[in-house]
Image (cartoon, grey):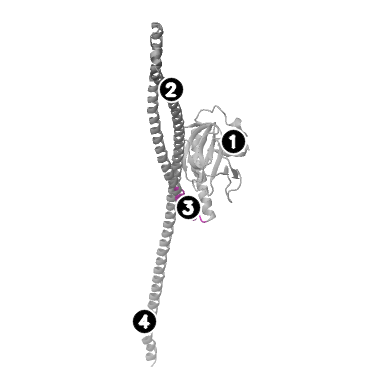
Amino acid sequence: MIAMMVARPCTFRLPFNALLLTITLTLNDAARAQFNDDAARTAAELTSLTAEIAAIQALIEASEQERDSLQGALREIDIQISESDLQLDLLTNERAALQRQLNDLDAKGLDIRAAQKKRAEIIDASIQQLWLLDQGGGLSIWLGDQNPQLITRNLAFLQATIADQQIVIKEYEEGLAELARNRDSIATTQETLQAQAEKQAQLRQRLADHRENQRQILSQIYAQVKTEEERLAALSADRDRLNTLLIELSELAARAPASAQPFEISKGALQMPVAGEITNRFGSRRNTDMLWRGWLINASVGSPVRAIHPGQVIFSDWLRGQGLLVVIDHGEGWLSLYARNHSLLRRVGERVSASDVIARAGNSGGGEQPGLYFEIRQQGQPVDPAEWIRR
C-alpha cells in the first residue's frame, strides 16, 4: 500500500509538466505574435512618417522652386517693362522730332508760296509792260528812228530786262518743284507720325499687360510669404545678397583711380536722388530684427532718378530683392545705390555727372509701393544719407 501510495504522485507529475510547458509555449507564442504585431505597426508608422517627411521636404523644395521661378518671372517682367518704357521714350522723342520737322516743312512751304507770289507779280507786271509797249507803238518809238547810240542803249536795257524776267521765270519753276517736294515730304512725315502713333499705342498696351503680369506675380510672391518669420528670412536673404554684391563692387571700386571731385567735400550739399517724401529713414526699424540701411523715398512711377555726385556706373541690372538697380562709384570707396527702378537709363562703364538722370522710379523687385530705395556706402558700410543730402 505504501509502495502504491508513493508511486501514485509520479503518475500525475508528467501531465502537469506537459501542461505547464504547453501554457508557457502558448504564452510565448502570444507574446511573440504581439511583438510581431507591434513591430509591424511600428514599421508601418515609421514608413508612414518617412513618407510624410519626404512629402513635406518635397513641398518645401517645390515651394522654394516655385519662389525661385516666381522671382525669375518677376525679373523677366521687370526687365520687359524697363525695355518697353525705354522704347516708348524713344518713340516719344522720335515723334517730337518728326513733329518739329513737319512744322519746319509747313513754315518752309509758306515761305515758298510767298516767294512764288512775288515772282508771279513781277512776271505779270513785266508781261503787262511789254504788251502795252507793243500794242501802243511805244516799243517802235522807243527803238525807232533815233540816235543809234540811244537805240543801242535802249535795246541793251530791254534785253537785260527780258533776261531778268527769264531768271524770275526759272526761279518760279524751281519754286514750283520745291513746293511739290515740300508737299511730298509733309505727306511722308505725316505717314511716319501716324505709324509711330500706332506703335506707341501698341507699346502702351504691352506695358499695361506687363504691369498686370507683374501685379499677378507679386500677389503670388506675397501669398507665399505668409508669416513674419518667412518675411524676415526673405528680407535677410535679400540683404545678404545685396551686401555680397556691394562688397564685391567696393573691392572693384577700390582699384579705380581717385575722382577729380572728391565725394567727402560734398557732405551736406548733395541733392535728393528723386523728388518725393522719405517714408523710411536710415536706422529706423524695418521689423523686429532689422533696421533700414538707407532711405525709402515715395515717388510716382516714372519719376526721374538723378545721380547725386559725379561718378561711374559699375552696376546696372536686376537684383533679387532690389529690382532694377544702379550703383555708382564716386571714388575712394564711396558708392551710391538706387533700387526698385521702373527703368534703367545708364549702362555699366558710363560716366555720369551730378543731376544726370540715370533711371526712372518704380516698384520693380517686389516693392509694394512705387518709389526709390537709396543708399550711400563707404568701403561697403552703409552711412546715413541725412548727413550728405541737402534738404
Sequence-wise, which precedes: disc 1 or disc 3?
3
**Numbered disc total:** 4
Percent of width and height locating residue 157: 41, 13
**What secondary structure prevails in the magenta region?**
helix
Figure quadrant of residue 21: bottom left
Q: Which of the two marks, 2 or 3, is nearer to us in this view? A: 2
Under circle 4, the secondary element is helix
Percent of width and height locating residue 263: 57, 31
Q: Is residue 44 above or below residue 206?
A: below
Q: Which of the two marks, 3 or 4, is nearer to us in this view? A: 3
Sequence-wise, which precedes: disc 4 or disc 1?
4
Can you identify the residue that label 3 sits on? 221
Task: Report if residue 246 is visible in the image.
Answer: no
Can you identify the residue that label 1 sits on? 271
Q: Amino acid at mark 2?
A: Ala
Q: CA distance from mark 3 to mark 4?
A: 75 Å
Q: Which residues are magenta?
A: 210-226
Q: Which of the two marks, 1 or 2, is nearer to us in this view? A: 2
Give residue 125's mark: 2
Under circle 1, the secondary element is loop
Percent of width and height locating residue 128: 41, 22
Q: Amino acid at mark 3?
A: Ile
Q: Which of the two marks, 4 or 1, is nearer to us in this view? A: 1
Under circle 3, the secondary element is helix
Q: CA distance from mark 2 to mark 3?
A: 83 Å
Can you identify the residue that label 4 sits on? 18
Give residue 209's mark: none
Residue 101 or residue 245, whichever sits in front: 101
Let me know if residue 302 is in the magenta part. Answer: no
